[in-house]
Structure formats: C-alpha cells, structure tokens
Image (tube, coloured by chain):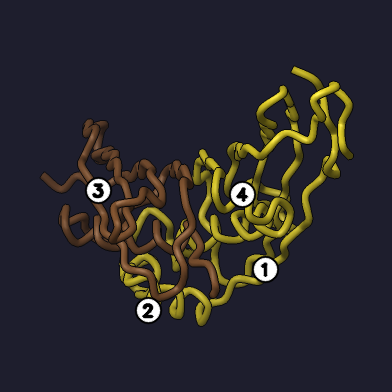
C-alpha cells in the first residue's frame, strides 16, 4: 500500500485553515514545522485538530501561527506541526 | 555520543521546473485556491506581482529528497523546520539541497540533522531554508563496534 506523504496532509490542513479561519487570498505562507510520528497509507482516514497559537499585527500585515495535530481514525498520532502565515491587514 | 557517518554527506538532488499548469493541478489536489496561485490579475496586484507556486508544493520537493535518502526512517520520525524566503514562479528551475550536518549515535539511538534548502538554479537564490532531523535504531553493537 502506498504511503501518503506528510507534506500532502499538511497541504490539506493549510487549505482547511484558509477556510476555517477565513484567511483571505493574498495570505503568505512564511514558515512550516512538521513532526512525523507515524505513517498513513493512501485511503486512510484521518482527523485534524488545530488551534491558533499566535497573532500579531505589524504595519499592513497580521501574522498568525496555527498549531495542529493529525490523528489516524484509531487515534494514533500521525503528525503535528505549526504553520505561520502573513495576512493582508485590511482593518 | 559518537560520530557515525554511514550516509553520504550530500543528499540526492531533486530538480523541478515550475509551470502554471503544475501550480493549477496542485491547487486542485490540495484545495488551496488562494488567488495568488491561480488568478494572474489578482496575483499581479498582490505583494508577489504575479502568480506564485504554493509553498507546500515546493516543500514537497525537499520532503521527496529526504524520503529518497532516508526512506522509512524519515517517514516515521522526520522533523522539518523551514522558512519560505522567496516564492517559486512559473518558469523557475528549482533544485533541492541537503547536507548532513550532525550524525550522533549512542547505544540506543542515532540522531541525524540535515541542513536543507530549495534553490533557484538560474538565480542561485534560496527559496526555502531550514533543518530536518530524524532518528533511527543504533548501528552500534553491544561491544561498542559499529555494524556498518
């Protein structure tokens, strides 16, 4: 069975974060941390838990960090990570 | 801790040519439709001044390099910590860079740290830079000798 790469999972997490946290187009991906704990195979079912961990404003930009954890359906941890993005501050 | 240089110091190079088609396909697969990746007009008026590739797509090239070199050890224990310095654009020719900078081993475990980067092969600019670490079972025998 083919293994599903961690970066592909994190790409999905990032796409979900854009939607869940209503991050607008123009958001810039600044940094990424990924810590792999287990392998998930193609077709595997996973769930994602995320929380914003930091948010600061500098000039015309807001900086957000989002920490997340990805679990297999049996609750085995697949990976964890932290995404940092820069969002246009239109407020 | 002892030095245990099993692997080559330089990791294999993964080369990629970025295209708008590749970026669009990645947007469809990942579900990341940030307009800086898919809308030339929006992207032109953004901070980037034009279409740019997804950071996670370009990070995938580095991940691939580490998987090719370290295999299952990377997939199960790998840690990545990177900064996206410059975005990749359509037409860019990219190449991964990886170098083992630390390789420590004790009776139980081996810890390897790599310096990693993604380079524009034409401009020589560094698009991504960071570190990768992984662990694996020790190659040291009970008598202290190494098995490799």
**Quadrant where the N terminus of chain B lies?**
top right
Chain in brown (letter): A
Viewer-nearest of labels 4 and 3?
A: 4
Q: Nearer the viewer, mark 4 or mark 2?
A: 4
Instruction: Indicate left or right for B28 with B140 as reference.
Output: left
Please give the residue where the numbered disc 2 appears in the rendered image.
B28
Label 1 resides on the chain identified as B
First in sequence: mark 4 or mark 1? 1
At which x and y percent is residue B113? 67, 33
Mark 3 or 1: in front is 1
- On whether disc 4 and disc 3 are found on a single subunit, the reply is no
Between discs 2 and 1, the one toward the N terminus: 1
Which residue corresponds to mark 3? A88
Q: Are marks 4 and 3 in contact (CB under 8 Å)?
A: no
Q: Say whether marks 3 and 1 touch (CB < 8 Å).
A: no
Q: CA distance from mark 4 to mark 1?
A: 21 Å
Q: Residue at x 58, y 47 (%)?
A: B128
Q: Which residue is nearer to you in this view: A48 or A39?
A: A39
Q: Are marks 2 and 1 in contact (CB under 8 Å)?
A: no
Spatial CA span between label 4 and label 2: 27 Å
Quarter containing the C terminus of chain B: top right
Classify 10 Å Cα crowding around label 3: few (below 14), some (14-19), many (20 and above).
Answer: some
Q: Are marks 2 and 3 on the same chain?
A: no
Which circle's residue, 4 or 2, is located before the other in the chain? Answer: 2
Determine if marks 2 and 1 fall on one subunit: yes
Distance (Cα) linking label 2 and label 3: 24 Å
Choose mark 2 or mark 3, whichever is in front: 2
Q: Is residue B46 left or right of residue A4?
A: left
**Is residue A14 in view?**
no
Query: Which residue position is annotated with label 1?
Result: B16
On the image, numbered disc 4 is attached to which residue? B74
Q: Colour of chain B?
A: yellow
């Amino acid at each position: 069975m083919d293994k599903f790469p961690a970066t592909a999972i994190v790409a999905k997490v990032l796409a979900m974060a854009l939607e869940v946290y209503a991050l607008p187009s123009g958001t810039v991906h600044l940094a990424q941390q990924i810590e792999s704990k287990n392998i998930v195979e193609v077709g595997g079912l996973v769930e994602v838990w995320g929380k914003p961990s930091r948010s600061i404003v500098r000039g015309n930009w807001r900086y957000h960090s989002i920490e997340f954890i990805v679990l297999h359906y049996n609750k085995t941890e697949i990976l964890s990570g932290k995404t940092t993005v820069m969002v246009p501050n239109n407020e | 801790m002892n030095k245990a240089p099993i692997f080559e110091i330089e990791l294999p190079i993964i080369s990629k040519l970025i295209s708008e088609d590749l970026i669009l396909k990645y947007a469809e697969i990942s579900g990341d439709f940030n307009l800086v990746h898919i809308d030339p007009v929006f992207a032109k008026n953004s901070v980037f001044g034009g279409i740019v590739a997804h950071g996670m797509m370009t990070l995938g090239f580095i991940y691939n390099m580490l998987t090719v070199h370290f295999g299952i050890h990377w997939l199960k224990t790998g840690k990545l910590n990177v900064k996206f310095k410059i975005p990749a654009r359509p037409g860019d020719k990219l190449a991964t860079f990886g170098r083992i900078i630390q390789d420590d081993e004790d009776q139980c475990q081996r810890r390897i740290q790599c310096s990693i980067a993604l380079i524009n092969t034409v401009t020589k600019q560094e698009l991504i830079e960071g570190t990768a670490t992984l662990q694996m079972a020790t190659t040291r025998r009970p008598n202290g000798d190494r098995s490799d």
